Image: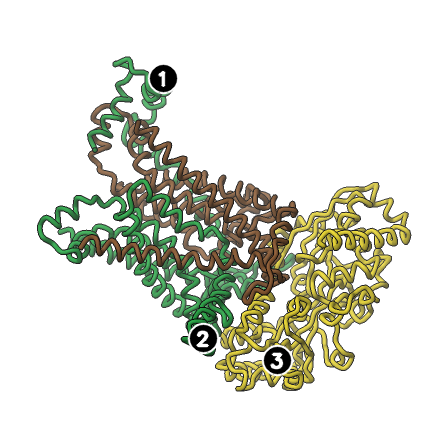
Chain colours: A brown, B yellow, C green
Amino acid sequence: MNRRNRIVLSCVYWAFVLYVFVPLILMILMGFKDSKFIGFPIRSWTLDWYTGVFEDAEVLATLGYSTAIAVLSTIVAVAVGTWIAVLLEGRKFIGRTAIFGLTVLPALVPGIISAIAFRIYARWLGIEPGMGAIIWAHAVHNVPFVALVVMARLSTLPKSQIEAARDLGADPIVAFLRITLPYLMPAILGSSIFCLLLSFDDFVRSFFLGGYDPTLPVLIFAKLKSGMSPEINAIATIALVVTAAIGIWAERFTRRLNKDTQA
Amino acid sequence: MTKLIFNRRRFLGTAAMTGAALASPAYLRRANAAGGEVNIWTYNDFVPEAFKEQFEADTGIKVNIRLVDDQGKQFNLLAAEAPNPSVDIMTVAGHRFLQFIESDLLAPLDTDRLSNWGKINPTFSESDWSTINDNKWGMPILSGMEVLSYNTELVSAEEAQSWDTLFSEQYKGQTAYVIQDMISIIMLKMGYDGNMVAYLDDPEKAAAIVEEAKQFLIEKKPLVRKYYDGGAELQQMFVNQDIAMAQSWNGPAAALITDGFPLAMTIPKEGSYGFVYTFNIANNAPNADNAYTFMDAILASPEIGAAMTKASGFISTYKDASNYLNDVDKKATSFSDEELANLQFFRAEANEMKYGLVDPAVEAIKAA
Amino acid sequence: MSNDAAARAHSGAVAPGTGERTFWGRLTSWPLYQILMAFLTASPRRQFLILAAFPLIWVLTQHLGPMLQMLRVSLTDAYPVAPGVEQHFTLDNYMRFFGDPIFWQPFFRTLTFAGVFTFCTLILTYPVAYFLARHVSRKNQMLYLLLLLIPFWVGEIVRTYAIMILLGNTGAVNMMLKWLGLIEKPIPFMYTSFSMGVGIVYLTALYMLLPLYSALEKLSKSFNEAAADLGAGAWTRFRRVTLPLTIEGISSGCTLVFLISTGFYATPVLLGGPSTTVFAETIAGFFHVAGDQWPTGAAFATIMFLTALILTSVFQKLMNALRKGDSK
């Protein structure tokens, strides 16, 4: 019974994997097409698009720039989002609903609107367009996701654990750092990956708040103007390989970290 | 291969710059002493890389290029930065001038400061759309037009002579167009002024015409496969054979032709509209002097114009630029005189009235 | 388990006394830290205020600030303001929506699409999340999850074009069907609500997967085993135990996906057909095509946003009631 369930479920999982990977495989395939346009049939193959990307300093710089923005904005978003989640979860106080509403607000605003609102607000605050402004906008936009995911996890933290720790004399900060935070780690890691994705993929905020250096999606949009060429697929594939490698490395790293703390 | 092209482009740029330097040595030397930078918002491939490098080397002015992909976004961005923009030169389409001018975002162009102004084909530099409030506002660089593009394996050249084919039952589910653009063409096809300048004094007539075009497009909605927005979408639809023909700009279609796709384009007998991309100087541009230096330099040689055409697929506004194109490029970027006779330019004078009527019509067609 | 953790925290706090110099011991015995703690925890009230101050300031200035600006714009008659033009406050931008039925169709269509796609995403991802959380060994869970996340690292546009060459007339699916001899003429998948759905679920799956996974992951296996001991079948166990206990994850996932779905722009525009126009396109039209209609665009965005917010809070209330009803 349980066995059959397991088989059915694993089929569903792998079918889902297939669904998400097929477009990806097509994308990678098209990066090798010897034509200015993607699509079937592929008559001849080439590596020129790839060599072109590696010779193109602009693309490489853009990759680094986008990565830096993603990482920095994620750090800010995770810190702020976790703080807000700790405040909101399991507490009743006047204005809680209002703060919760405000917290999720940036996630609900359509991209174009939020980008323009950020742009106007940035000018009002005197923030110059550029890397700092993009990081700011991405961080604000991502805070709700961190807060929601962390809150969901926090709601399941057995109260007794914290109480036991407090009874034994741990102050709130130590109790938070030694019990709550480790318990939240899966949620924090999950939402970090999520934030990295959102930032890396964001076009409209990056466009409105950016300066003269394009982020990767901004560059791709500009290149798209002259056609969806295999070059864009090559760029995206390289970005994918790099980020996937970092993701797997991070997974390994946290796994080792977990082992160390357990030992 | 890549290297060869690079060298050739570089050579073109060098040759052009040598010419420019000889033509106005004093001017450039002054700029050279000034140094500094110039900030440009433009489309990908509009400023040839080789030219940019040569210009920077010759003048000491650093060229910062920010890529834009849409006129509306460019407007929004500039509006958000006004009145102290970070940009010197933008790339505005001629028929969008008025919007920028009314919002005080553009500075009038002082053509006396451009010694090479005369190298632009007067069709573009002296056309009816180019002078607004007795001023010139932009320097024409590339021109595009609305064409009927079609897959030559599926549609015959005779059929493509008329916009009607786009709405025939025979090609049901195999056509695509941009609604905004199509409304102007439908008005022209029905014998009206698609720019609506003729009806500035008669708003009722204008409204009736737009209504007629709207009803036509709603009636034909079951036949269309896709209302699209961007050139890349159009190309993908052709490549995937989702469509057999479409109303399109010539640029994206030209790129398909040069890549060997069985595509052709025509300006149908009912006529069509063209537009011109121009370099414009922003109001309160931080480096206006450098902007003039840059614009004068890029005008210096038709070879630069040809390089821009090759990279973008749009038609150069420079005199004699086509002398520097090969046969395939020429095929993809030239039309017969007969066809060109049917072409009119988009004009901005009546835009407020026109888009006040057309935008709701577009919403209604999409909602229908 | 809970006692272990408490003991770990405790060991830090008392470490100085036992001579065990852990990091936590050193930290808590550091005088400066003790002074700080004494200040922070002087009273529960102060503790709370300090905890609340930063989030409050943050959400007010960073989350609300930009939106208030937008709201202000939606109430004006001209933006950006050209020099010499006087700006007036007006409700016209809102009235425009209620006065013109052509805006209603994309509006309700968007809400319907968002609802349907949210449901589809839930149905598709729940088994996936369940499999991940319950049938994959704990040490591999992160890896399996990452496997699903990797494709989302490809930008929306590139991925959308990949879907075009998957579903186009000469696309991979049609080629496959032809090769199998199932069809002679290609099936026009593209530019329909089907192709749009394929693209949208791609975007929303991630937003659904993570809350579901974290809700399922925390569900201890012992619950189910206890139920099995009592003789409950697999389906009953799922319906009576697993499902109610993951309602919170379902509710937050659906809320997230629904709200985000109402704002999708690029994917519906690129993959949709002539009759699938969504409200985001209408809104974007006011910013793109006619650059001087920001106020109307802002007003329409506000309407969409408020409607979606009301709908999701009703939904959340329902889910909460369901959960409470079940746990009784």
Q: Residue at x 47, y 78 (%)?
A: C185
Q: Residue at label 1?
A: C30
Mark 3–mark 2 distance (CA, rounded to whole Å) = 46 Å
Q: Residue at label 2?
A: C187
Characterize the local packing of mark 2: few (<14), some (14-19) or many (20 or more) Cα atoms within 10 angstroms.
some
* Residue A163 on image: x %, y %: 21, 31
Which chain contains the residue that carries disc 1?
Answer: C
Label pair 2/1, CB-CB below 8 angstroms: no
Residue C99 falls in image quadrant: bottom left
Mark 1–mark 3 distance (CA, rounded to whole Å) = 81 Å
Q: How many marks?
A: 3
Q: Are marks 1 and 3 on the same chain?
A: no
**Nearer the camera: disc 3 or disc 2:** 2
Mark 2–mark 1 distance (CA, rounded to whole Å) = 73 Å
* Quadrant location of the N terminus of chain A in the rendered image: bottom left
**B328 or B271, nearer to the observer:** B328
Q: Residue at x 28, y 59 (%)?
A: C314
Give the left or right position of residue B336, taking residue C279 as reference. Answer: right
Characterize the local packing of mark 1: few (<14), some (14-19) or many (20 or more) Cα atoms within 10 angstroms.
few
Q: Residue at label 3?
A: B203
Q: Secondary structure at mark 1?
A: loop
Looking at the image, is mark 2 or mark 1 earlier in the sequence? 1
